[in-house]
Amino acid sequence: MKKILIWMSALIIGTLAGLLQVPAVDAVADFVAAVYTRLFQLLAVPTIVLAVILTLASLGSQGGAGRLFGRTLTYTLLTTFSAAAVSLLLYVLIAPSDLTSVADGAAEQLQSVAPAASQTGAPLTYADHLLSVVPNNVVRPFLDGNVLSLLLLSFAVGIALSRLPESEPRTAVLHLLQGLQDVLFLLIRWLVWTLPLGIVAYAAQLAAQLSAGVIVDSLGRYVAVILGGNVIQFFVVLPLFLLFRGLRPLHTLSRMMPAILTALFTKSSAATLPVTMQTAEQRLGVSQRVSRFVLPICTTINMNGCAAFILVTSLYVMQNGGVVLTLPLMLSWLFIAVIAAVGNAGVPMGCFFLTLSLMSGVGVPIALMGIILPIYTIIDMVETAENVWSDSCVCAMTDHDLSDAKSDE
């Protein structure tokens, strides 16, 4: 609660400072915002790469579980992809307004912050998009901040490490990567501690450029897409998965409600894990073998709400940075959101910071992320509850499938 009050206070102070239209204040806000943007860009690439590699590499030790792990991974990817797809459809239907399109001079000012955005938004053919993803050397994607290429490389390296047999070289590589990630997370915590100053600067920047009515309308549509996608995934899509596997959604939901409510208020799937496991075993009747294998994995990689947030927020920020949201671009970011959500485990502030890192890597103006941050506190509660509900569904479906297979033998 204290953190929320600090963030909201920073947002109000920054907005008021921007509305004053004092040149000296605007200059200071621009400078501070530029500093934070550069720091986020500095941390963007290693955050994405290390998170995805280490998450996928950690799955190597689960390889011997065979069918159990296969079902868990399949259901995780299906539910995560469906969450992102639902949110993409809502984004197209609700169409959050472009802040820069209705404020005099704001488009030019925001576009000048990120000249790379105009290149990103240039219409490309499907062949051009696919070709731009495939790197021709290891270093170039890091230098260019090519997010798709970085995720492709990270995914490949993570899977390769997970397939390597246990050996001293493999352990040494993992220890090195884990150590680098620990150092990175410490730097991130320091940056997050000073983030209220950045919120003040970003809010002042936007308030000086945009009218309050435009902000309310545009952010209202953005929040409607985020929360609408979570609600549809929670009450429609996930129950359909259960029905398809022959399970009763209302029964499953009522039995798992203690874990879902705990997740809503703790905003942490990891902190809720003991409750989720106990509830699944004692109230839902899932076997210990399944729950104690599936749920820890799902807590790490099954991020339905995160995938939706990454996709919608990325499209919203890019749109306001002057990027033309073509169909190939949106479909590309659908897959980026799914892969990034799978690799999100352990990142402080969850998918918010990972989204911010992705946007910094793309090179679009990230001032809007400072405005979204206070709103994210509410979104995070809903997303965490959805993630735990999805974990519960994956666990229930896996247990049901394995029980049927065992009875058929």
Image (cartoon, rainbow, N blue to C red):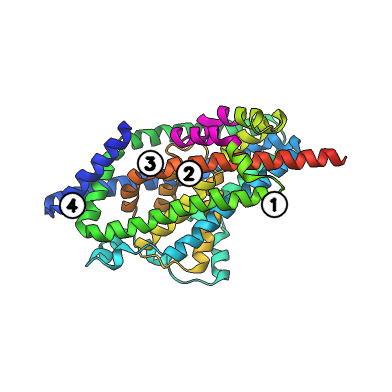
Amino acid carrying label 4: it is Gly
Mark 1 and mark 2 residues within 8 Å of each other at the beta carbon: no
Give the number of the mark in front: 1 or 4.
1
The answer to if 14 sits in the magenta stretch is no
The CA span between labels 3 and 1 is 33 Å
Which numbered disc, 1 or 2, marks the residue that appears first in the sequence? 1
Left or right position of 109 against 126: left
The CA span between labels 1 and 2 is 23 Å
Amino acid carrying label 3: it is Thr
**Residue 18 - label:** 4
Tally of marks:
4
Mark 4 and mark 3 residues within 8 Å of each other at the beta carbon: no
Q: Is the magenta stretch mostly helix, strand or loop?
A: helix
Which numbered disc, 2 or 4, marks the residue that appears first in the sequence? 4
Amino acid carrying label 2: it is Glu
Amino acid carrying label 1: it is Phe
**Circle 3 residue:** 377
Give the number of the mark in front: 1 or 2.
1
